[in-house]
Amino acid sequence: MEGNFIHDIIEKDIAEGKYSHNIITRFPPEPNGYLHIGHAKSICLNFGTALKYGGVCNLRYDDTNPVKEDDEFVGSIENDVRWLGFEWANLNYASDYFEKMYECACTLIKKGLAYASDMTQEEMRATRGTLTEPGVNDRNRDRSPEESLKIFEDMRAGKYADGEMCIRAKIDMASPNINMRDPVIYRVLHVSHQHTGDKWCIYPMYDFAHPLEDAIEGITHSLCTLEFEDHRPFYDWALANTDWPEPPQQIEFAKLNLTNTIMSKRNIKKLVEEGQVEGWDDPRLCTIAGMRRRGYTPEAIRAFCDAIGVAKANSLIDMSQLEYFVRDDLKNKVESRFVISRPIKLTITNWPEGKTELCAVENNANVPEMGSREVPFSGQLYIEQDDFMEVPAKKYFRLYPGNEVRLKGAYFVTCTGVVKDEAGNVTEVLCTYDPDTKSGTPGADSRKVKGTIHWVDAQTAVRVPVREYGYLAYPNEETGKNEFDPNSRTELTAYAEPSVAQAKAGERFQFFRSGYYIADSVLSKEGAPVFNQIVGLKSSWKPEQK
């Protein structure tokens, strides 16, 4: 990411010799769900920044809340980071620092900067004050350091029930920043931890743990999203009062918000638990696992994150911008295939009976080095319904009675008539072909036509399941919030050229004139792929010309 304000700060720090060691960043997800595109931005920023300045980036599990955390999420996070193309210098757990955090809390208590409180959450909420009114001092605020330290030791020993006692920082109940009004830094929680087991029954609050984790690891620049800006004064306070010689610097940046999707882990989890999506890797979700299954590439996601840059104010990015980078990355990477999603039969009436031949078709028109393939062709074909109109619209250059088009890689055909059912619907298009116009033969291109359409041979076509996708969510007109669209996936059976049946799970193709598709990694079986639509061919977003 070039020229962003975070890098300007880092370069100033380097020039001034602020730190005695190289730049160290960290990516610190809480293992309470799968990562999404917003986390991808943070991954690219943290790892990319470390790489740019010759430093390192740690992966740290911020596992201070055992109620919501799970080993499944731990494994998924590592897969996602590596899939995006990054490798961490150290793999750390916040819970590995619990002893040091406990010692830091003891230091604050001994300094008279923290105290034990038996106030309930409801009482704290009632005495916290408002943005315009100061809070009320805790009745335990003047408890002696010795008494508070003994209570803290008893909390650790399991002598208090959940919610019966906590430790609060002693700062300023009249602070204009509510986060500085004696925040809780430790609470009692009798629950088994996924990493430390039953060793602890007290756990640090995130706002207290966060700066200490950074300091313990020697982080130089702690890059956070904007919601942490109001918490920075406490971040700095905690570090200043627990005596760190080279404290890290917290810098906030705008989080990524995308149109037409749901990004909150809490809301995604609800969709998963209610069975409205297939799981955390549903291809409609903007989880990294879902985008990987959908067929997005790590290169496209990195390019997108680089293009949107780093800002100081939140904004809403159109989903079409992400789709542009996916499409742009795939266009020179994947081969095309003929697939007919909504077929209508085409019969060549002057085709020799029983004859089948092979037509050579290039695999990627943009990349001649990808070569060509041979596709079966006969007098019985399927074409897309949209490629025929009995009464053509203005500037319609595809097939209609009396019009001639090229069948891609094959011959010119002219529509001579149609077959209809009892309701008057066209069920078959009748054509004649010109045997002297086969693609690739001398003189075949001497006569020009405006329309070229694709096809599959009806006798050898294979039927493949295809899943097409709309956007996961649309904004509610009254609330403005994105709401899940249960009709965001459509399933159909398409007709494809024979080679498509041999696609391996994870193999991508351009379905000619339709879009990019991938053989689903979960549902595909050998010889029986199921395809997910990755992205269509047309883009509504274009990059600015420089």
Image (tube, rainbow, N blue to C red):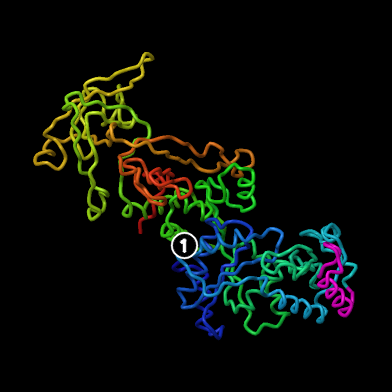
Residue that extends furthest to the top in the rendered view of this protein: 422
Residue 152 colored magenta? yes
Residue drawn where x is 79% and y is 78% of the image: 106
The residue at 51%/64% (across/down) is 81
Give left or right: position of 12 versus 500. Answer: right
Judge by depth and name the residue closer to the eye, 53 or 252: 53
Q: Nearer the viewer, residue 359 or 141?
A: 359
Residue 359 in percent (x, y) is at: 20, 40
Q: How many numbered circles does the render carry? A: 1
Q: Residue at x 12, y 38 (%)?
A: 444
Coordinates of residue 250 in the picture (x, y in percent)? 61, 71
Q: Quadrant of the C terminus?
A: bottom left
For mark 1, does the 10 Å Cα neighbourhood hold few (<14), some (14 to 19), or many (20 or more) residues?
some
Q: Considering depth in this image, is 397 or 106 the residue closer to the camera?
A: 106
Secondary structure found at label 1: loop
Q: Position of 294 compared to 355: left or right?
A: right
Q: Which of the 4 image quadrants contains residue 340?
A: top left
Q: Nearer the viewer, residue 157 or 55?
A: 157
Asked if residue 61 lies in the magenta stretch, the reply is: no
- The x, y position of residue 108, in whole percent, is 78, 78
Q: Amino acid at mark 1?
A: Leu
Question: To which quarter of the image does residue 428 belong?
Answer: top left
Seen in the picture, residue 231 relative to 461 is either above or below; the reply is below
Which residue position holds label 1?
84
The span picked out in magenta is 142-167
Above or below — where is 342 with respect to 281? above
Query: Looking at the image, which residue is at 81% across and 70% down?
Result: 167
Residue 223 image offset from top left, x and y in percent: 57, 69
Quarter-of-image position of residue 402: top left
Answer left or right for 412 relative to 259: left
